[in-house]
Image: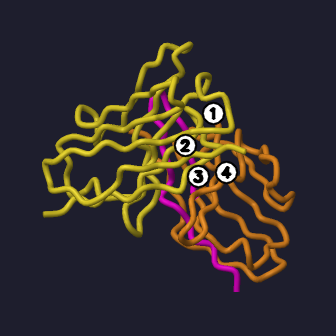
Chain colours: A yellow, B orange
Amino acid sequence: EVQLVESGGGLVKPGGSLRLSCAASGFTFTNAWMTWVRQAPGKGLEWVGRIRSETDGGTTDYAAPVKGRFTISRDDSKHTLYLQMNSLKTEDTAVYYCTTGGTYYGYWGQGTLVTVSS
Amino acid sequence: SYELTQPPSVSVSPGQTASITCSGNKLGDKYAFWYQQKSGQSPVLVIYEDNKRPSGIPERFSGSNSGNTATLTISGTRAMDGADYYCQAWDRSNVVFGGGTKLTVL
């Protein structure tokens, strides 16, 4: 059974940093492209960015609103995906979901809430 | 940047057919994907590559995509199908979601 468990969310002040983690199991993580998607309270889904598998180069793509501030990385030895978020803004407040896939998303975690507020 | 447009809400009576549209420039030249999100839950993929159903998704869910519009169709709609539905496509190196449609079954 595929499981994706996000952690690391919480309350942070504007300008602060936070690192989210996503522990994956039940599939071959090493071969998987992985993606972060977020959802602001009461709003729709927003793609944040993705990372390719190492065999496909391990490169990343980001949405314009987070480019230069967020960094996606992976540790294949730990089957874990990360999202480093710097220079956080109030508009980054959202539930952050870890998902499998690069172009569409078959499995989703339960999400972790990030609140950016002073 | 590429945009996908969905109607904010659609209503349907139980047992009837619900159609949710998703519009984007030359969307028919891309693949469309659909997700269902019930209140307080994570999204679930219900249609991929325009018209394919993942394992476990009921046959009453179907999809089509042509021209500038992709359509999610739910035949014989049940009360349990009430949810938010999001279309999604990818363009170059970016992935785009539609704004979502709230399906009310009444």
Q: Which residue is mark 4?
A: B45
Point out the residue furthest to the bottom here: B106
The first of marks 3 and 1 along the sequence is 1
Q: Is residue A13 above or below residue A62?
A: below
* Front label number (1 vs 2): 2
Q: Residue at x 58, y 49 (%)?
A: A108
For the residues marked 1 and 2, what is the alpha-carbon distance in whole angstroms? 25 Å
Number of dots carrying numbers: 4
Q: Residue at x 81, y 47 (%)?
A: B55
* Front label number (2 vs 3): 2
Point out the residue furthest to the front here: A78
Bounds of the magenta segment: B86-106
Q: Nearer the viewer, residue A21 or B90?
A: A21
Q: Secondary structure at mark 1?
A: helix
Task: Have a look at marks 1 and 2 and say if they share a chain.
Answer: no
Q: Secondary structure at mark 3?
A: strand
* Type of amino acid under label 1: Asp
| Quarter of the image where one finds residue B22 | bottom right
Report x, y in % for residue A85. 27, 41
Numbered circle sitting on residue B87: 3
For the residues marked 4 and 3, what is the alpha-carbon distance in whole angstroms? 10 Å
For the residues marked 2 and 3, what is the alpha-carbon distance in whole angstroms? 16 Å
Question: Does the CB distance between marks 1 and 4 fall below 8 Å?
Answer: no
Q: Is residue B37 magenta?
A: no
Task: Have a look at marks 4 and 3 and say if they share a chain.
Answer: yes
Task: Have a look at marks 2 and 3 and say if they share a chain.
Answer: no
The reply, left or right, for residue B78 in relation to residue B83 is right
Report x, y in % for residue B20. 65, 63
The reply, left or right, for residue B49 in relation to residue A69 is right
